[in-house]
Image: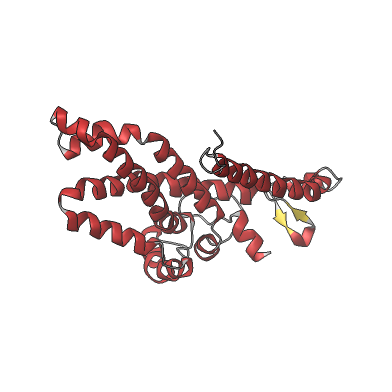
Amino acid sequence: MNTSLTERGGLPLLAAWLAGASVCAVFALIACFALPVVFSAQGGQIFSWVWRPDTHEFGILPMIVGSLLLSVSALLLSWPLAVGVACAIQDGGKKRLFGCTIAGIVRFMTTIPTVVYGFAAVFLLVPVVREAAGKGSGLCWLSATLMLALLILPTMVLVMDSAMRTKERNVRITAAALGFTRSQTLACLVLPASRRWLLTAAILGFGRAAGDTLIPLMLTGNAPHVPESLFGSLRTLTAHMGLV
């Protein structure tokens, strides 16, 4: 019996393959233009620790390290908080208003432009960090980490919440038969079953943090060196491209 492409599940698979092929084509195009420069006589200068255009030194390693430091620190701060918020939304289901209120706030946060987060941090967060450090301008690794963690939080919460809702529906009858409370169901059944989606949310959050330009541009201080502490300045690759 003949079945259509959609009924066989071939259309989503075809779309996935096309998307993957498009991404590979983009990376291949970038590599075609970038690799000749990297392997040229001047390519070694790119992977050095010094960025001084006036002396023709164009090392980008400080910016690569800065991007990793900022993205990983924001993820480490935001991911556990995202898990807690997603659990609060699920566990608050018995108090519908509580769960809906938190979910509404998270969804509203996704509509706020990044520049609003940046300006709010400049006027509200940076002075607090500057006083805590006792020196400097307050534009540093810590300020950018705190605001970037807040920026990527809604993305991870929405992914986690969607997955946990699906898993909770699948185990609801089993949990009720075993006499589990809602909190016990969440902790013992839903969270372990959602671990892949929790990891997916972390990957998406890291990508969102690594790809952001405005927050690093406005809050890190943009010094092209590796910071010595949380109160030190750094520069990310995205901010570096925006500046240079």
Colour setting: secondary structure
The answer to whether residue 241 shows anywhere in this view is yes
Taking the spot 29% from the left edge, 36% from the top edge, the residue there is 170
Q: Please state the horizontal and vertical placement of residue 13, each as a whole percent of the image.
A: 57, 40
Taking the spot 45% from the left edge, 54% from the top edge, the residue there is 145
Quadrant of the image containing the N terminus: top right
Q: Please state the horizontal and vertical placement of residue 157, each as a whole percent of the image.
A: 36, 50
Of residues 42 and 185, the one nearer the viewer is 185
The answer to whether residue 228 shows anywhere in this view is no
The answer to whether 173 appears left or right of 33 in the picture is left
Quadrant of the image containing the C terminus: bottom right
Taking the spot 20% from the left edge, 34% from the top edge, the residue there is 173
Q: Please state the horizontal and vertical placement of residue 225, each as a whole percent of the image.
A: 61, 52
The answer to whether 202 appears left or right of 217 in the picture is left
Task: From this view, report whether residue 60 is shown above or below residue 120.
Answer: above
Task: From this view, report whether residue 186 is shown above or below residue 26.
Answer: above
